Amino acid sequence: MRGIRTHLKLGQAGQSVRSLDVTSAIPGEGKTTAALTLARTSARAGYRVVLVDCDERQRASSRNFPEGEAGLGDVLLGNAAWKTR
């Protein structure tokens, strides 16, 4: 994962990547694991990271955070405020 993060940082022609989409057409291929690992290693390296899980039916990444945390739907509906840590 560090290698992927480094490759993304370098980008092409010295331009760093500002966003990344981890997606697949088939369930169970490791999308959540890859996204969480890239987000965590990037945050630990000092980068600002926003992880958005848009799967409202099976919010797999939400299981890795404390209960009661607001989700994307809560923020979009105005039921929770956008906050940074």
Image: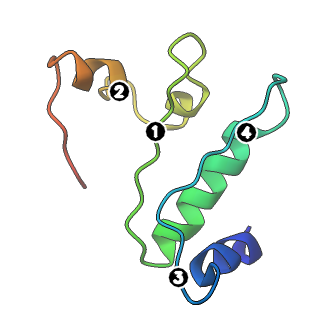
Q: Are marks 3 and 2 in contact (CB under 8 Å)?
A: no
Query: Which residue lies at the image location 42% right of the left edge and 78% below the top edge?
Result: 46
Circle 3 crowding by C-alpha within 10 Å: few under 14, some 14–19, many from 20: few
Q: Are marks 1 and 2 in contact (CB under 8 Å)?
A: yes
Give the residue type at disc 3. Answer: Gln
Q: Which residue is mark 1?
A: 52
Q: Are marks 3 and 4 in contact (CB under 8 Å)?
A: no
What percent of the width, then of the height, locates residue 62?
Answer: 50, 29
Q: Tag 3, which secondary structure?
A: loop
Tell me if residue 6 comes above or below residue 79 in the rendering.
below
Mark 1 to mark 4: distance in Å? 12 Å
Label ID, residue 15: 3
Query: Which residue lies at the image location 46% right of the left edge and 67% below the top edge?
Result: 43
Tell me if residue 16 comes above or below residue 76 in the rendering.
below
Quadrant where the N terminus is found in the figure: bottom right
Tell me if residue 18 comes above or below residue 32 in the rendering.
below
Q: Earlier in the sequence, mark 3 or mark 4?
A: 3
Give the residue type at disc 4. Answer: Lys
Q: Earlier in the sequence, mark 1 or mark 4?
A: 4
Label ID, residue 72: 2
- Looking at the rendered image, the disc whose residue lies closer to the viewer, 3 or 2, is 3
Give the residue type at disc 1. Answer: Val
Q: Tag 4, which secondary structure?
A: helix
- Looking at the rendered image, the disc whose residue lies closer to the viewer, 3 or 1, is 3
Q: Quadrant of residue 32?
A: top right
Q: Earlier in the sequence, mark 1 or mark 2?
A: 1
Q: Farthest front residue?
A: 13
